[in-house]
Image: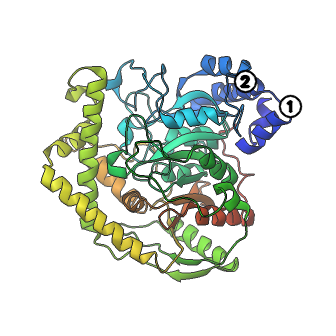
Amino acid sequence: MSDDTAWLDATAQADLVRKGEVSPLELLEGAIARIEKLNSELNAVIHPLFDRARTRAAGPSGLGDGPFRGVPLLLKDLGAELAGTPFCEGSDLAGDYRSTVDQELAKRFERAGFAICGKTNTPEFGILPTTEPRRFGPSRNPWNINHSTGGSSGGSAAAVASGMVPVAHANDGGGSIRIPAACCGLVGLKPTRARVSVAPQYGDMMGGLVAEHVVTRSVRDCAAVLDAVAGPVPGDPYWAPPLRGASFSAAVTGEKQPLRMAVMTASPTGSAVHQDCVRATEEAAALCERMGHRVEIGALDVDGDAFTEHFVNVWAAANAWVLLDWEKRVGRTATEEDVEPLSWALIQLGRSISSDRYLSSVQALQQFSRHIAAYFEGIDVLITPTLAEPPAPLGTFDSPPGEPLHGLFRAAAYVPFTPPFNVTGQPGISLPLHWNGEGLPIGVQFVGRFGDEETLLSLAGQLEEAVPWAGRRPPVSA
């Protein structure tokens, strides 16, 4: 069963269950076998939940009766809480903490029928765009185990790319869905701000920077899972605009319209962009033109240094809040030894930011958002590289002794294209449209107007049909 279902997407696996051709327990046992086979090399899954999943998959009413009944899914060990299960967010500080509540998203995954069978590796508090936490060690990229999976949803991306499971939870506060999707050759959509609720623990996270969703191997899975989990919870502070059409899935297969597009390969913060990433983006833009879309050269007219300063202020303050949240959970004050040096330095920076300085940065970023929204009045989609470099070798973001923030500044040069759209709240999707000469995937990012995932999913479906990636298999895989 492991070999028969490993490379079917979640939609196809669910279809087998509906037809009675396979049972949920058989699907689950196949996924468990693949995890046990591959995880020693990839270190993607850090908390197996096999027995819990088996109990639910074997029982007559243990799984939800939604569209993905019986399909195995992994939760990222950051943000997505599942009552009674380990929850660490990559940190020694958590100790043996277990969640006391279910996140609304976890409930929606289970109502959709998914069998949650484990939790995946993440950098401490999701800070870096790589998954190399001190506590659990590095996740490894199935395309080349000496390279990063990206982060912070790197464990999830490695699991899906290698065929352990067809879909895994991910979230994104500065690129953490799109970055690992690019590094591991997957589809990674960051939805519009507040499209997916972060209740009950939070109204929003990090001032609205964080969005929840999944990484997948197919566009149709990306859309169908969003159909299953999107929507507010009563009491949420705000919510995303309603859909124009019937569903996100309908957007993938529906009528296609010519789009006005802009392509930008220069970093908005002025950092260097690798030629592999430029080439992938230019080829994607040329493909869009051949499909009948109008493509022009674009640029974001922003002060890159000012944007970085204000983003870091908000990011640092948010991580100080994260530590305070953990101190409440574990019932004690954290010490420098409890967390990694970079995390501690960033948290201390956050604690040093006064309330007026913080709100000044919030104001500046909101002004930036309005400026970018005005730019999108003239285009439907912006095309950029997802990353400024190919997937980085492991260790790239290590900080030398005495320079704990070095890794963070190195990360800023690596991911200049993703954080702007966490600030604006716009949807962005990374698609696996290119592999370089070393056999590493190079993602291309497509950004839509606020609230307009439908246009991105429609375009993504076209591109998937034009340049199929489903047949590609990494060297370490099921």
To which residue does mark 2 refer?
29
> Element at badge 2?
helix
Quarter of image, res 87: top left
- Where does the C terminus fall, quadrant-wise? top right
Image side of residue 127 versus residue 85, left or right = left
- Determine the CA span between mark 1 and mark 2: 16 Å
- Looking at the image, which residue is at 44% across and 25% down? 101
Q: Classify mark 2: residues with Cα within 10 Å, few (<14), some (14-19) or many (20+).
A: some
- Looking at the image, which residue is at 46% across and 62% down? 426
Q: Is residue 269 visible?
A: no
- Looking at the image, which residue is at 51% across and 48% down? 180
- Where does the N terminus fall, quadrant-wise? top right
> Element at badge 1?
loop
Residue type, mark 2 in image: Glu
Which labelled disc corresponds to residue 20? 1
Q: Earlier in the sequence, mark 1 or mark 2?
A: 1
Residue type, mark 1 in image: Gly
CB-based contact (under 8 Å), mark 1 and mark 2: no
Q: Is residue 251 visible?
A: yes
Q: Position of residue 362 (x, y in %)?
A: 25, 58
Q: Position of residue 205 (x, y in %)?
A: 36, 44
Quarter of image, res 455: bottom right
Image side of residue 161 versus residue 336, left or right = right
Say if 324 sits above or below 208 in the image: above
Q: How is the image coloured?
A: rainbow
Say if 140 sits above or below 241 in the image: above
Foreground residue among 220 and 275:
220
Foreground residue among 164 and 189:
189
